[in-house]
Image (cartoon, grey):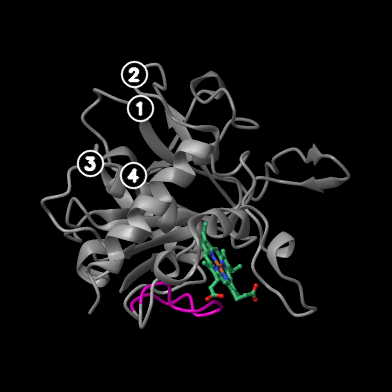
Amino acid sequence: MLIRYFTAVVLIVFSGLANAAEPSLFIKTPGKDTVVPAAAIFKGISIPDDAAIHFQALDNFSAPIEKATLMNSAGDGATAYIAIEKPDEKWPVIQMGHEQYSAAPFYLVWKDTTKSRISTELWVMQLAGFSIDRPFSELYPNVVPKKNISNADAVMRGFKIFKVNCFSCHTINREGSGKIGPDLNVPYNPTEYMHEKYLRIFIRSPKSLRHWDKERMVGFPSAVIRDDELNDLISYLKYMSGRKV
Ligand code: HEC
């Protein structure tokens, strides 16, 4: 895995690329900032288009971001910049509920968001860095549905639900780093030994099916996984029961 974390020291190297932006350019940034185009910090490294890129914030918040989104510099869509707090011009403190914090040291900000939609999560405060992995399909070939399954297929949709919600704790075919819960395909897939009705109840609320003090699986209410998404997830699990390794 290639990891590119940048720190203040590293950014000084890039500071030649930085320029002072008009405050109005980035409506969500706290003040007049020094910004570096995000694409610039990856110059010189070849990153495959389907690489798995994640951003990471200081509080360990991490989420995937598409290469095409992060590194777009063609001007036909929104462009990402990394805003850097200047030592002599501290950003204002932000009040969030009872907590106060600052977006510093780095803040992922976007220009031209009218050209392509950028979700709020992608305005990353307290940015710590990016990690770049090989594509998921290369890292975990036996977790991904086969190539003949199209993106529109329920199995593929269910795989995406699995990846986001379950893969952090469960392996499939013993592949993956989440080992808090049991493997969900070998030797048996839960769709083989659990009645579907109870499997659904379990995913929604493990406690409501069985209870002991040390249970660690969280429930997934419909606010997190909608009913149609749960159907897709079960389609994926059923499909994988026919793809054991
Ligand atoms: C926070 C970690 C975690 C997440 C996330 C998680 N699980 Fe679990 N899961 C567990 C653990 C641990 C167990 C073992 C029972 C327990 O401790 O609750 C388990 C048990 C299960 C079981 C029962 C297996 C058996 O044989 O008893 C199923 C089925 C299951 N998980 C499916 C899922 C699905 C589907 C998702 C995603 C929607 C998911 N889990 C997300 C941790 C997790």
Q: Callout 2, which amino acid? A: Lys
Q: Callout 1, which amino acid? A: Ala
Q: Callout 4, which amino acid? A: Arg
Real-space Cα distance between discs 1 and 4? 26 Å
Observer-side mark, 1 or 4, equals: 4
Q: Residue at x 49, y 40 (%)?
A: 122
Give the mark nearer the N terminus: 2 vs 3: 2
Real-space Cα distance between discs 2 and 3? 25 Å
Per the rendering, the mark at residue 168 is none
Q: Callout 3, which amino acid? A: Asn
View quadrant of ligand 1: bottom right
Give the mark nearer the N terminus: 1 vs 3: 1
Observer-side mark, 4 or 2, equals: 4
Q: Residue at x 35, y 80 (%)?
A: 186
Q: Are marks 4 and 2 in contact (CB under 8 Å)?
A: no
Give the mark nearer the N terminus: 3 vs 4: 3
In this rendering, is residue 233 above or below 80? Answer: below
- Name the residue beneath numbered marker 2: 115
Instruction: Say which element carries label 4.
Output: helix
Per the rendering, the mark at residue 151 is 3
Q: Main secondary structure of the magenta part?
A: loop
Instruction: Say which element carries label 3.
Output: loop
Real-space Cα distance between discs 2 and 1? 6 Å
Residue 19 as seen in the image, left or right of residue 59: left
